[in-house]
Amino acid sequence: MNRTEQIQARWGKSTPGPWFIHNKDFAGEYQELQIGGSDHNPCFAVLHNDQKYNAEAIASAPADIAYLLHKNAALRSIENLLADFCENCPFYEELCDPECRIMVAIKILQEDV
């Protein structure tokens, strides 16, 4: 299983969004973040106010990751098209420069960072 598949599997098991920040103020120092769950079974985290940006990042994670996985799938489609283009080129074996922009793009897309 590659890294993208691992991410998809983890997010497939997580509580679906939207996740959100409650604007409950605990003595001016803390905020409550609803990470998931339903109205009957919510999951909360309480964060110190200086972690506001962490709370925003966590609350946005489901939508952000779905967006990035969608973009990743589009890039993988482009990778396949480019690979097919190069492999079907009559000059592929003889003239193709390994530093060709298409070849470099294919190598980058094939990296599983």
Image (tube, grey):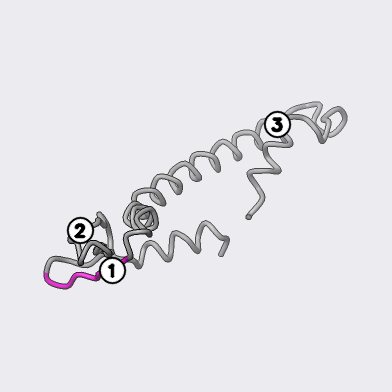
Judge by depth and name the residue closer to the eye, 34 or 32: 32
Distance between the Cα atoms at labels 2 and 1?
Answer: 10 Å
Distance between the Cα atoms at labels 3 and 2?
Answer: 47 Å
Tell me the amino acid under the disc marked 1: Val
Residue at the image position 20 percent from the left and 66 percent from the top: 27
Mark 3, secondary structure of its residue? helix
Tell me the amino acid under the disc marked 3: Ile
Q: Position of residue 68 (x, y in %)?
A: 45, 46
Residue hosting label 2: 22
Tell me the amino acid under the disc marked 2: His
Above-or-below relation of 11 to 98: below
Distance between the Cα atoms at labels 1 and 3?
Answer: 48 Å
Mark 1, secondary structure of its residue? strand
Q: Which residues make up the magenta segment?
A: 40-47
Residue hosting label 1: 46
Say whether residue 8 is left or right of residue 33.
right
Residue hosting label 3: 102
